[in-house]
Image (tube, rainbow, N blue to C red):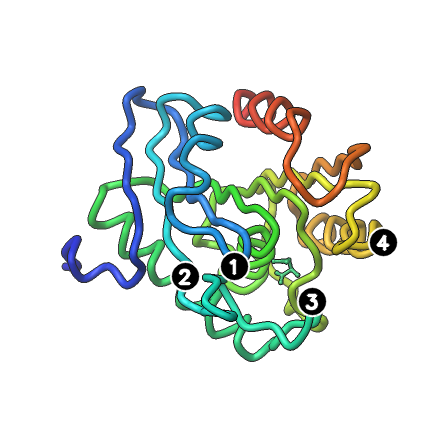
Amino acid sequence: MTTKNELSFLHRFVPASEPGRPPLLLLHGTGGNEDDLLPLGRMISPGSALVSPRGKVLEGGMPRFFRRLAEGVFDEEDVRLRANELADFIADLREVYELPAPIAVGFSNGANIAAAVLQLRPEALAGAALFRAMVPLKDAPSADLTSKPVLITSGTSDPIIPAENAKQLAAQLQADGAIVQHHMLPTGHGLSQADVTLAKAWIEKL
Ligand code: MLT
């Protein structure tokens, strides 16, 4: 039996204040930390339990969830290793905090690792809200994502993520059986009020 101190990621845990709300796994972007997305989690699903780990990979001192070779060019061996490590952490935290499988809520690099977890360890997550996500693995294995809800929001003027790439991710997850909602928003890489509004409405219908 894993104990809280043995959990393998530095993280914040906020217990649920409303029973029945889905637990959220909050995954920050490059240079973020475990505090970043707590306000977002509270906004999109008030009363949910929140678990927010800090990425273990450092790029020039900035925490991330996997290594990249350049912007948008990923070290896919590391993506695989880190996605499995995160899925193991999820299994352990569920035991420690007595939670059902969480919904991942990821921004940018956090959204990309969440997409990789869906493709490599689908059992780890009940679904995912992916803000500014891109394809994490060129040759992802096909996963059984039957009926898993996935929300993807992309920015039409995002300088980091080409719209086509985000559409490809949506298509891959849909082909694996996920129920994908993909929204292209008139914005850039940063989060906007529209992301929050869409995610809140999406979670309420789960
Ligand atoms: C990534 O590295 O995951 C993406 O390029 C997004 C980012 O974190 O900048």
- Give the CA distance from mark 3 to mark 1: 20 Å
- Give the CA distance from mark 3 to mark 4: 16 Å
Work out whether 47 lies above or below 188. above
Q: Position of residue 46 (x, y in %)?
A: 41, 21
Which of disc 1 and disc 3 is earlier in sequence? Answer: 3
* Crowd class of label 1 (few under 14; some 14 to 19; many from 20; radius 10 Å): many
- Give the CA distance from mark 3 to mark 2: 22 Å
Would residue 116 be found to the left or right of residue 139 on screen?
left
* Crowd class of label 4 (few under 14; some 14 to 19; many from 20; radius 10 Å): few
Q: Give the residue displayed 28% in from the left and 35% down from the top.
A: 14
Q: Give the residue displayed 28% in from the left and 22% down from the top.
A: 17
Q: Give the residue displayed 60% in from the left and 60% down from the top.
A: 143
Kind of residue indicated by mark 4:
Glu
Q: Which residue is mark 1?
A: 117
Camera-side residue: 143 or 43? 43
Q: Which of the two marks, 3 or 4, is nearer to us in this view? A: 3
Mark 3: is the Cβ under 8 angstroms from ligand 1?
yes
Kind of residue indicated by mark 3:
Glu
Q: Which residue is mark 2?
A: 86
Q: What quarter of the picture does the N terminus occupy?
A: bottom left
Which of disc 4 and disc 3 is earlier in sequence? Answer: 3
Residue 164, numbered circle: 4
Q: Which residue is mark 3?
A: 71
